[in-house]
Image: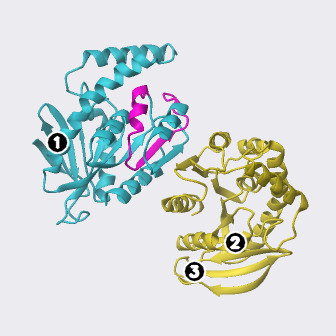
Chain colours: A cyan, B yellow
């Protein structure tokens, strides 16, 4: 892990860009006042859709600031095939198929969803785990670790295979391969699941089925009106309280 | 409205029992430190299942204390046919039919639900409105008003007919007459709806359908694991924040 830039945001949060091999990432650590100086900060991994870190930055830094105010470090890495990372031809093909199906108003078939998501999960999850190794070796960062955010299938797989993740906040979003429902049954960590009730790119019943499938004893579903990007601001507070309950 | 007893609870909340005609009720007002002394406190009506105020008292006073800490006055009244109020033979008959059906493991027919709930709603709602008139005439109580709690059908009817109610926290619970789904479409105030995912006495799909039916632009569904009485403590905090957003 190699830090490539450091800057102090308004409010004192330290933002450091890094590379982990070929993978770019960003780490935010709380201002000294918010965190106890002698105790390493618990960490939340910030998941995001595969649109590139640069495009996602405004939303990510908002979440990082909010989490830092609660005393959390946050970190994110670029997904395979996104941003400045080399394109994956198979994923590009699946994206084109998805776009075509959606523009034609056709149902998105299982084979498109599988081709789009499963290789991404298979590649991304070991990268997030390698990032976790590197991040937890820093003296200012400690466990326990939470995963928060998008590509719900990455969050599911990480929650199953990575024992250092003790809580996850997931978006019961679109395009979940059938195989991930089986993995969801093996998730046991506390879950906080968001659902946008009128999400035009989402199948509400599939999202409810996914929530039902999770094996966790503690799982909460927060459903709100509106489309994919319309999550109300108070839900950001609710996610923050969820992580404060489970990571502190 | 006639006060019949007054006592100060630990923490300074003032608890006053009252009668409104034949109807007993309880009013809780916040300790002077929590409320602004010059401003009347906003009011939350505490709904409850028809088990009698005496039996419900421990849970009601918990909710009252919590609300008082946020600066809210709270009040509740006995439901028709409950507690020390005269029994309603038709409702008693419907309760017996319900018990028999549930003990026999039979589905609870629409006619039992209608007979149990619709007369209760028709009688109770004008009583709650009369209580509201009396409560809002007290100088220490002001609007706006919220409704929080059980007998979801009473909450629905009140939200439709009573313009002083500007927000409602409802339990997407059991035994909702079909006719109330139509009324639910006419609800427009912000809603905070709780659902216990594994509620043995509840039909999950009916609860989701009810949430979908509500006409409100802002409505949130919070679903959690466990049975009817297993609502997690953090959901009490979430309801409190909902009312703070909408009544202050």
**Residue A60's x, y, as percent?**
31, 42
Residue A230 in view:
no
Query: Which is more toward the observer, B28 or A165?
Result: A165
Q: Residue furthest front?
A: B104
**Residue B126's x, y, as percent?**
83, 61
Which structural element holds mark 3?
loop
Identify the residue shown where x is 43% and y is 32%.
A181
C-alpha distance separating marks 1 and 3: 51 Å
For the magenta stretch, what is the residue range? A175-203
Residue identified by numbered label 1: A17
From the viewer's perspective, tell me whether residue B141 is left or right of residue B124.
Answer: left
Q: How crowded is mark 3: few (under 14 residues within 10 Å), some or many (20 or more)?
A: few
Tell whether label 3 touches label 1 (CB within 8 Å): no
Mark nearer the viewer, 2 or 1: 2
Query: Same chain, marks 3 and 2?
Result: yes
From the viewer's perspective, tell me whether residue B178 is left or right of residue A36.
Answer: right
Q: How crowded is mark 2: few (under 14 residues within 10 Å), some or many (20 or more)?
A: few
C-alpha distance separating marks 3 and 2: 33 Å
Among numbered discs 3 and 2, the one appearing first in the sequence: 3
């Amino acid at each position: 892990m190699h830090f490539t830039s450091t800057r102090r945001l308004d409010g004192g949060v330290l933002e450091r860009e890094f590379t982990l091999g070929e993978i770019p990432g960003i780490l935010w650590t709380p201002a000294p006042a918010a965190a106890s100086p002698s105790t390493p900060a618990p960490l939340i991994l910030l998941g995001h859709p595969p649109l590139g870190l640069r495009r996602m930055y405004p939303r990510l830094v908002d979440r990082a600031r909010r989490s830092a105010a609660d005393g959390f470090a946050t970190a994110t890495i670029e997904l395979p095939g996104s941003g400045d990372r080399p394109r994956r031809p198979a994923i590009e093909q699946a994206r084109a198929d998805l776009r075509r199906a959606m523009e034609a108003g056709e149902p998105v078939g299982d084979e498109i969803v599988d081709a789009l998501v499963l290789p991404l999960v298979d590649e991304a999850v070991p990268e997030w785990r390698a990032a976790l190794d590197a991040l937890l070796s820093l003296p200012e960062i400690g466990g326990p670790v939470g995963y928060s955010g998008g590509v719900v299938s990455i969050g599911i797989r990480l929650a199953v295979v990575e024992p250092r993740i003790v809580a996850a906040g997931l978006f019961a979003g679109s395009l979940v391969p059938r195989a991930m429902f089986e993995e969801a049954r093996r998730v046991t960590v506390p879950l906080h699941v968001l659902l946008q009730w009128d999400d035009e790119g989402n199948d509400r019943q599939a999202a409810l089925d996914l929530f039902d499938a999770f094996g966790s004893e503690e799982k909460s579903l927060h459903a709100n009106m509106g489309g994919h990007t319309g999550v109300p601001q108070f839900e950001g507070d609710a996610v923050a309280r969820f992580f404060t309950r489970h990571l502190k």
